[in-house]
Image: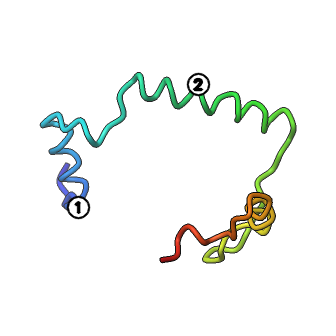
C-alpha cells in the first residue's frame, strides 16, 4: 500500500498487531450476543415489524415517547442533568 493511512486506522492496526484485547470482542461474548438477539430478530421478521422512522437530529421516534410514558419516564430524561 503506497498511500497514507489515517492516524485512527494506524492506531487500530498497531493495537491489533500488539494484541490489545480491550478493542475486540471475544468469541464467547459474540456467541452470547447472538443468543440474545437471534430470537428477537426472528420475531421481528416473522411478525413483519418495521422500525419506526424519524428525522435525523430529532429526539427519536414518536412511539418511544408513548412507550416510555407507560413506565412514567419522559423520553430524554435519562440524558439530561
Judge from the rendering whether residue 13 lies leftward or rightward of residue 42; answer left or right: left
Q: Is residue 58 above or below residue 18?
A: below
Q: Residue at x 18, y 52 (%)?
A: 11
Q: Residues within 10 Å of mark 2 (few under 14, many from 20)?
A: few
Query: What label does residue 41 carry, if any?
Result: none
Q: Secondary structure at mark 1?
A: loop
Question: Residue 35, located in which quarter of the rendered image?
Answer: top right
Residue 17, horizontal then vertical, whole percent? 15, 36
Residue 37, horizontal then vertical, whole percent? 62, 33
- Residue placed under numbered mark 1 in the picture: 6
- Residue placed under numbered mark 2 in the picture: 35
Query: Which residue sits furthest right?
Result: 47
Q: Is residue 57 above or below residue 70?
A: below
Tell me whether circle 1 and circle 2 mark residues in contact (CB < 8 Å): no
Quick one: label 1 or label 2, which is nearer the N terminus? 1
Q: Residue at x 56, y 28 (%)?
A: 34
Indicate the colouring scheme: rainbow
Q: Residue at x 78, y 59 (%)?
A: 67
Residue 66 vs residue 27, the one in the foreground: 66
Q: Residue at x 70, y 34 (%)?
A: 40
Judge from the rendering whether residue 28 lies leftward or rightward of residue 48; answer left or right: left
The Cα–Cα distance between marks 1 and 2, rounded to whole angstroms, is 35 Å
Residue 23 vs residue 12, the one in the foreground: 23
Question: Residue 8, located in which quarter of the rendered image?
Answer: bottom left
Question: Residue 65, located in which quarter of the rendered image?
Answer: bottom right
Residue 30, horizontal then vertical, whole percent? 46, 28
Amino acid at each position: 500500500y503506497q498511500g497514507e493511512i489515517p492516524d485512527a486506522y494506524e492506531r487500530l492496526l498497531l493495537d491489533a498487531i500488539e494484541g490489545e484485547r480491550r478493542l475486540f470482542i471475544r468469541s464467547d461474548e459474540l456467541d452470547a450476543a447472538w443468543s440474545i438477539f437471534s430470537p428477537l430478530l426472528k420475531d421481528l421478521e416473522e411478525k413483519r415489524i418495521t422500525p419506526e422512522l424519524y428525522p435525523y437530529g430529532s429526539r427519536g421516534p414518536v412511539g418511544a415517547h408513548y412507550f416510555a410514558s407507560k413506565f412514567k419516564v419522559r423520553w430524554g430524561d435519562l440524558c439530561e442533568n
